[in-house]
Amino acid sequence: MSDKSSAFNTLSAAGKAAVLDELLAARPDLREPAEAYAVQVMTDTDRSAVADDVEDALQGLDIEELNTWAGHRPGRGYVHPAEAADEILDETLQPFLDDLQRRADLGVGSAAVELAVGILLGLYNCRHGNSETLLEYSPDYAAERASAVVSDCAKLGIELPAAELLDLMPEWSALLH
């Protein structure tokens, strides 16, 4: 079967996960190599790629997103555009934070450090919020979330390379101490 007609390749991530679960249930001998590959995936982290992904995700949010979140919302009352922007930005950043939690839980410390540094660098690159993006409505978003990431890392036992971060993010020296 070619890639163009592969049913597996057309599945969503959830569908592929279900197939993998079924395959591992039917073939327990594959669990060990699958686990080894999963650890490899979880330990392979490129901070620059993560930073680019965070920056692209946050900068890529169009102001038009506010139309569905801000204003009067039934059952919620009035939602200020800045509050709506924060909520949308948080929803976009959350998968990166969830990944950080998973890596910390797995005990892959160096990968967790690289991921955290990548998240912080991505936020740093968004610190000046561009016009026509949601960051324009939430000018302190990047610094506030970076502070939360630093705090979360301390709670998770992830030791950030403070001196290196100070060199990479000089405008946030107070946040990194």
Image: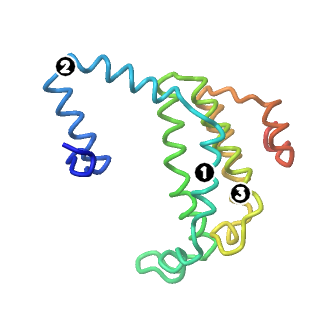
Nearer-N-terminus badge (3/1): 1
SS of the residue under disc 3 = loop
Which quadrant, please, contains the N terminus? top left
* CA distance separating discs 3 and 2: 45 Å
Q: Nearer the viewer, residue 16 or 151?
A: 16
SS of the residue under disc 2 = helix
Q: Is disc 3 in contact with disc 2, using a CB cutoff of under 8 Å?
A: no
Give the residue at x 64% y 37%: 47
- Relative horizontal placement of residue 19, taking residue 36 as reference (left or right): left
SS of the residue under disc 1 = helix
Residue 83, given in percent of the width and then of the height, sits at 60, 69
Nearer-N-terminus badge (3/2): 2
Give the residue at x 61% y 76%: 81
The numbered disc on residue 126 is 3
Q: Nearer the viewer, residue 161 or 24?
A: 24
- Relative horizontal placement of residue 25, taking residue 172 as reference (left or right): left
Residue 88, given in percent of the width and then of the height, sits at 54, 64
Q: Mark 2 belongs to which amino acid?
A: Pro
Q: Residues within 10 Å of mark 3 (few under 14, many from 20)?
A: many
Residue at which label 1 appears? 54
Above or below residue 58? Residue 130 is below
Above or below residue 155? Residue 98 is below
* CA distance separating discs 3 and 1: 9 Å
Residue 170, given in percent of the width and then of the height, sits at 86, 44
Residue at which label 2 appears? 28
Please identify the residue farthest to the bottom as the structure is shown.
72
* CA distance separating discs 2 and 1: 37 Å
Place residue 48 in its image quadrant: top right
Q: Nearer the viewer, residue 48 or 102?
A: 48
Q: Mark 3 belongs to which amino acid?
A: Cys
- Relative horizontal placement of residue 121, taking residue 45 as reference (left or right): right
